[in-house]
Image (cartoon, helix red, strand yellow):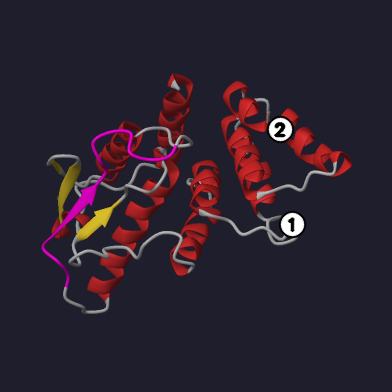
Amino acid sequence: AISACEGSRQWRMALALLGWLPSLRIAADTVLCNAAIRACDCGGQWQVALDLFGQFDSLRLVPDIVSYNSVLDAVFDRPAGCDLFREAVERRIYPPLLAYYGHLLDLHELSVGAAVIAVQVLFSQVRAGRAAGADVLRGLRIVTGWGRSRDEWDRGGAGVADAVQQLLTVLGVPSVPAKGSWLVRTRDVLFPAMAASPGQPQEARRHRQTETRRQ
């Protein structure tokens, strides 16, 4: 029932159903809370989604990859987004950035919001490394996939690919498409063609809302 609230954007009903569980002698679990977080995200209630995610400890629940993907979809353009993403990496919910051969960012297991944050965090690391005098790679491959390769909660591989392409465009970082991925030169990350647009978060959120309505 809570999952049905996600599709109809009935976030209040989702929270009400979650609150009724104790009276029915049903314990809330990670799956039910994940569904409620997604319902809040679809209803545009990012603060409520974040608050619900923050209750996992008090409910004695352990967030999984769906939990982080869901809450990051809600807060990817908020200050809490990067901190939550780094927390997920530290907990090994997500693999370390550039885990394969040091030049490949694989976004296959990430939702749209998590993928956008992953690219931004990676670019920040590249710039910080260069500023500290570290050697940097010549290029990066950002793998978004060819289509729907994740669980049923996912909004589709095409959504991740489109969101990443939009982000690169707004950041002024040229890219070359290559079989389910984007090739980016490191020097373009260090010296983008144009400054990041203040409207980027709003544009990305509108894109995510459009993708959600298509489901």
> What's the magenta region?
136-151
Task: Please rate how many residues cluster around mark 1, counting C-alpha atoms within 10 Å: few if below 14, some from 14 to 19, many from 20.
Answer: few
Which residue has dot 2 on it?
Answer: 14
Badge 1 vs badge 2, beta-carbon distance below 8 Å? no
Q: Amino acid at mark 1?
A: Leu
- Answer above or below: position of 67 versus 200: below
> Residue at 39% across / 48% down in the picture?
110
Rendered location of residue 115, percent (x, y) = 37, 47
Foreground of the two, 197 or 154: 154
Residue displayed at 19% across by 47% down: 193
Q: Which mark is residue 138?
A: none
What amino acid type should be assigned to the residue bearing mark 2?
Ala
Q: Is residue 198 left or right of residue 4?
A: left
The residue carrying mark 1 is: 59
The residue sitting at the front extreme is 25
Q: Residue at 44% x, 24% y: name it.
A: 210
Please state if 199 lies on the left or on the right of 67 as rendered.
left
- Does residue 185 appear to the left or right of 108 in the view shown? left
Q: Secondary structure at mark 1?
A: loop
Give the mark, 1 or 2, whose residue is nearer the N terminus: 2
Count up the numbered dots: 2
